[in-house]
């Protein structure tokens, strides 16, 4: 039985592994998505010590650091079920998709979040055929084309700025008249002369035949309720990945995140959480907050295994 199993290969998970390794805990880190949401960050300008670094490069550094310890194992794959071993406090059993079972005395859920879908007609039909959920990942494929980016947060505004570097034209479609993104990214999109704001507007339907040809909207823009586009990037937030911890009975807050205390403890003894899935940083999903939560969770696991709460 491992001392701790960390589920999630993102910022919080790797940071937790670095700390549990330094605490000399026998650690396994598990996941099927390398780098988590960090892989979709084209430019990271707010990680201390790195003025400018690409998200995938930063995540590779996290991984290399975590795996530099002899007492950290990485298992690539999806965890399907999480259960308790024996009596309360004796440990946890993690069943992998391939049937393998991993047991650990404590578990840290660093499962992150999943991209939110709009649920409009044509969205699923054209997924992978012009509809994507990561503008910064897929903008390269739309060189000299016209695209629409939907949303008003950091991922949408950053995505529009990145897409504008290669696309002929970018429509930034937002249901409100103000963006929630960092002023840094708002300044970036304002600097681009090939980004056109489409505000107070909702997307109604993705149009196309073999691939995306347009986006139907509820407020006419330049006299038309259809934007002629080759791609639609949906960046309307994310949903915490709480399916596994809910199998244990972990409680959620009113926004659907795992409810944790200041030690990153869930309501289940021996189960901790860190990163985008948790409520620990006032829902402020950043590399720095995820790293902070991961380190706190690791410290709490160490205390727990030493006989603390």
Image (cartoon, helix red, strand yellow):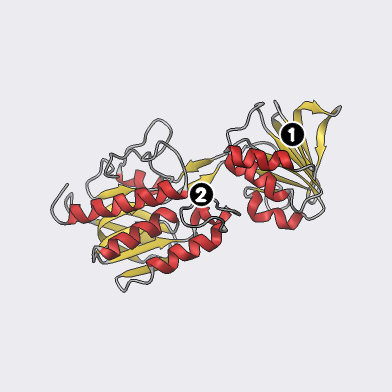
- Residue carrying label 2: 46
Give the residue displayed 62% in from the left and 48% down from the top: 133
Q: Residues within 10 Å of mark 1 (few under 14, many from 20)?
A: some
- Residue 71 image offset from top left, x and y in percent: 29, 71
Residue 88 drawn above or below residue 53:
above
Q: Residues within 10 Å of mark 2 (few under 14, many from 20)?
A: few
- Residue carrying label 1: 197
Quadrant where the N terminus lies?
A: bottom left
Q: CB atoms at circles 1 and 2 under 8 Å apart?
A: no
- Residue 215 image offset from top left, x and y in percent: 77, 38
Give the residue displayed 40% in from the left and 53% down from the top: 12
Res 199 visible = yes
Give the residue displayed 38% in from the left and 42% down from the top: 278
Query: Can you name the residue that lies furthest to the right here?
Result: 223
Give the residue displayed 33% in from the left and 71% down from the top: 69
Describe residue 108's horizontal placement relative to residue 202 as left or right: left
Dividing the picture into quarters, in which one does residue 123 lie?
top right
In front here: 188 or 121? Answer: 188
Describe residue 85's horizontal placement relative to residue 55 as left or right: left
């Amino acid at each position: 039985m491992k001392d701790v199993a960390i589920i999630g290969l993102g910022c919080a998970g790797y940071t937790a592994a670095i700390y549990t390794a330094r605490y000399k805990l026998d650690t396994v880190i598990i996941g099927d998505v390398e780098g988590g949401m960090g892989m979709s960050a084209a430019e990271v300008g707010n990680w201390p010590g790195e003025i400018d670094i690409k998200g995938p490069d930063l995540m590779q550094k996290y991984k290399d650091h975590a795996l530099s310890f002899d007492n950290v194992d990485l298992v690539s794959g999806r965890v399907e079920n999480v259960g308790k071993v024996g009596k309360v406090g004796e440990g946890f059993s993690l069943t992998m998709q391939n049937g393998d079972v991993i047991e650990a005395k404590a578990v840290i859920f660093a499962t992150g979040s999943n991209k939110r879908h709009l649920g409009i007609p044509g969205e699923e039909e054209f997924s992978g055929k012009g509809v994507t959920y990561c503008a910064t990942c897929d903008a390269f494929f739309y060189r000299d084309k016209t695209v629409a980016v939907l949303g008003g947060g950091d991922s949408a505004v950053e995505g529009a700025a990145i897409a504008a570097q290669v696309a002929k034209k970018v429509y930034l479609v937002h249901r409100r008249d103000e963006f929630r993104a960092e002023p840094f990214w708002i300044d970036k999109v304002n600097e681009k002369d090939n980004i056109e704001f489409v505000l107070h507007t909702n997307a109604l339907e993705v149009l196309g035949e073999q691939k995306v040809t347009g986006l139907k909207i509820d407020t006419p823009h330049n006299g038309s309720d259809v934007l002629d586009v080759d791609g639609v990037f949906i960046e309307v937030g994310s949903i915490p990945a709480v399916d596994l911890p809910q199998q244990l009975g972990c409680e959620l807050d009113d926004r659907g995140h795992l409810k944790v205390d200041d030690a990153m403890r869930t309501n289940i003894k021996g189960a901790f959480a860190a990163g985008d899935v948790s409520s620990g940083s006032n829902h402020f999903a950043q590399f720095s907050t995820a790293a902070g939560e991961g380190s706190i969770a690791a410290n709490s696991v160490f205390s727990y295994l030493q006989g603390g709460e």
